[in-house]
Amino acid sequence: MSNPSEARYDVIVIGGGNAGLCAALSAREAGAARVLVLECAPFALRGGNSRHARNLRCAHAAPTEILTDAYSEDELFDDLVRVNGGVTDAELAKLVVARSAECVPWLQTFGVRFQAALRGTLQLDRTNAFFLGGGTALMNSHYAAAERIGIEVRYGAEVVALDIRDGTFRSATVANGERRYEAHAQAVVLAAGGFEANLEWLREAWGDAARNFVVRGTPHNTGTVLRQMLAAGAAPIGDARECHAVAVDGRAPQFDGGIVTRLDCVPLGIAVNRDAQRFYDEGEDVWPKRYAIWGKLVARQPGQIAYAIVDAKVRGRFMPSVFPPFEAASIPELAAELGLPARELEATVNAFNAAVKPGSFDPDALDDCRTDGLTPAKSHWAQRIDTPPFTGYPLKAGITFTYLGVRVDGQARVVATDGTPFANVYAAGEIMAGNVLRKGYVAGIGMTIGTVFGRIAGDSAAHHASH
Ligand SMILES: Cc1cc2nc3c(=O)[nH]c(=O)nc-3n(C[C@H](O)[C@H](O)[C@H](O)COP(=O)(O)OP(=O)(O)OC[C@H]3O[C@@H](n4cnc5c(N)ncnc54)[C@H](O)[C@@H]3O)c2cc1C
């Protein structure tokens, strides 16, 4: 067997999630003969955060088999700009939006299958295409396609250093257990995710609060490649504190709990901190445009803990957590179950109930059920919490992925601090998502960014390698 350190590839892709596999498939499609994917996880954990994802967001002009109605490019662009408070690289955001419509048919050519969207608090049937079998099935399709078309994949292959000289990538140092070797290529695609699984780095950004964060996805996205690339002179993009973070069940494991620990009941009830005080408008906007801020909201509460409380009226209207809820016949009893101060919780619920204005409850629309004269207000879906049994869930900040990344251009080339692109270094997915996502998130855009930029990066890298 040849020594892997002597192998020379056209394109090396670092990271075997959706962005990496899209880049590898696209590089092969564009004619790169020798494509290598270096994935640090073992086979069983391949696919990074992508194996947890369920859908991607895409513009479309008319109903399709898997999407209802129409979702114009303008509307998707507006959604993206709004959730980011107007701060985004508009050119790259437009590129993502314009190419989002191609994602489903392109993925289908490699065997990815989709299903009709779900209804309920997700409200995504018009905007998001759901992977049949979820992200794990998506990643299995990707890896099967990679094998069919001759892409080499190495598992347990952690890139620990990059050799970049004069703006040009030469090789990556790969650690495989005790063994280390160099992998050389004409071009490299960085698709190794963010730094969300690096608790030390999170602590640098968030201070001690990070100790109470839960990492929803893979423990392997530690940001090693991002750090290496920034040290090599890549221009950083985004803020280390900005991230996608949702409210997860407080009983979730430290890593890789995935989607089943997320709690979607917040807009249907109230959320209180450990002092039993409400702290934010639970019904500010539809949940797909708000769920991704709730991790940060919980992170700012004392002890980084909060509690969602609903009553029997909304049972069955949200996806339940994998953990059983705390339940009681009265609010003081529920407070005791949750370890909250009973009198304070009762006072908070009473004040909330007194402020609820009559309206027509509609969980699928921005309804007119709101509070009056209450701070913070609840702007939609405000119903009295008065029907036992009462249900509560502890909430923790569940970090999904970080936005600090490397700056790229429209060809997915990584750009140096002096504004010039590296000669043969491309990036896709979480490691560059901050170019588009600075503050906020719309559900499904992570996989869209990874697919669109994965395709572009693979294509650009293959073209570079052929010249
Ligand atoms: C629970 C959960 C649910 C989600 N649901 C959705 C959803 O429904 N829709 C959506 O759009 N987004 C969703 N996301 C976000 C989405 O998963 C990410 O935006 C997307 O997966 C990013 O793809 P990626 O390829 O950049 O990263 P990843 O899929 O995480 O892949 C990165 C890969 O790089 C590997 N790696 C890391 N460091 C190294 C190294 N040094 N050397 C070699 N390999 C390395 C990792 O092992 C990993 O496999 C979800 C995320 C989570 C955690």
Image (tube, helix red, strand yellow):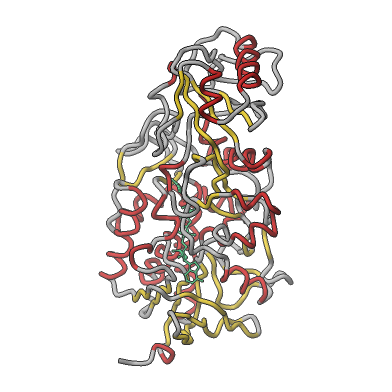
Locate residue 41, reporting x and y percent.
41, 68
Identify the residue at horizontal 40%, vertical 64% (top origin): 21
Along the line of sight, the residue nearer the viewer: 92 or 44: 44
Q: Residue furthest left?
A: 148
325 in relation to 432, above or below: above
Along the line of sight, the residue nearer the viewer: 218 or 243: 218
Identify the residue at horizontal 37%, vertical 80% (top origin): 34
**Quadrant of the frame with the N terminus:** bottom left
98 in relation to 127, above or below: below
Along the line of sight, the residue nearer the viewer: 267 or 343: 343
Locate residue 81, reporting x and y percent.
62, 42
Name the image quarter holding residue 32: bottom left
Give the total of numbered labels. Answer: 0
Locate residue 135, reporting x and y percent.
37, 52
Q: Residue furthest right?
A: 418
Identify the residue at horizontal 48%, vertical 33% (top origin): 264
Q: Is residue 77 visible?
A: no
Name the image quarter holding residue 466: bottom left
Along the line of sight, the residue nearer the viewer: 420 or 327: 327
Q: Is residue 220 visible?
A: yes
